[in-house]
Amino acid sequence: MPVRAGYSYRAFRPLVAYFSKRLEIADPARASLGSPEDRFTTLFTVQPVDEVNCIARVLFAINFAPHLTEADMLPRQDVVYTQDSEIVETQRPERIPTDLRDEMHHRTDRLGVEYRRWLRELGITYGTL
């Protein structure tokens, strides 16, 4: 079923982030199956082990589709987070550059740019370049 989605992102502090996905059913004939209040949310926390290794924890929640079980939802989340982990684990340099001139040729998204600026402003040096 096609949906329109809107995202909001928050970094509460370095190593703790959250995003919320607002869902709206795109087909007017089926719109009553959802609600403008439908949300899919994810909380990420990261525990450094050393400057280049960490343990990431992910918690997700929804406030719709009560019939879905954990077994229904986990395969999709595993696909998404496996794709993300492959990107993160191949990042070079391994530590986060706070000066974008130090980063490889990859185009960085706005969130990444703002996160690096925030780390610089906070004076975070552990795990950064």
Image (cartoon, grey):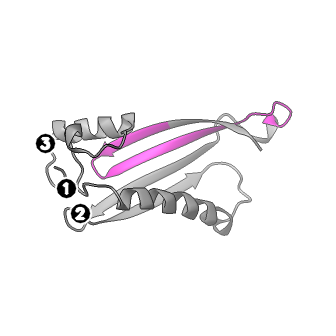
| Residue kind at label 2, given as amino acid type | Val
Look at discs 3 and 1 and give the one toward the viewer: 1
* Left or right relative to 74: residue 85: left
Residues drawn in magenta: 8-31
- Most prominent secondary structure in the magenta stretch? strand
Q: CA distance from mark 3 to mark 1?
A: 12 Å
Residue 116 x/y as whole percent = 26, 40
Between residues 126 and 63, which one lies in front from this camera angle? Answer: 126
Residue under the image location 43 percent in, 46 percent down: 18
Q: Which residue is mark 1?
A: 127
Residue with the most extreme front position: 105
Q: Which residue is mark 2?
A: 52
Q: Which residue is mark 3?
A: 123
* Left or right relative to 74: residue 121: left
Disc 2 on helix, strand or loop?
loop
Residue 68 x/y as whole percent = 71, 60
Residue under the image location 24 percent in, 38 percent down: 100
* Left or right relative to 115: residue 62: right
- Answer with mark 2 or mark 1, whichever residue precedes in sequence: 2
Mark 2 nearby-residue class (10 Å; few <14, some 14–19, many ≥20): some
Look at discs 3 and 2 and give the one toward the viewer: 2
| Residue kind at label 3, given as amino acid type | Gly
The answer to whether mark 2 and mark 1 are in CB contact below 8 A is yes
Residue under the image location 17 percent in, 36 percent down: 121
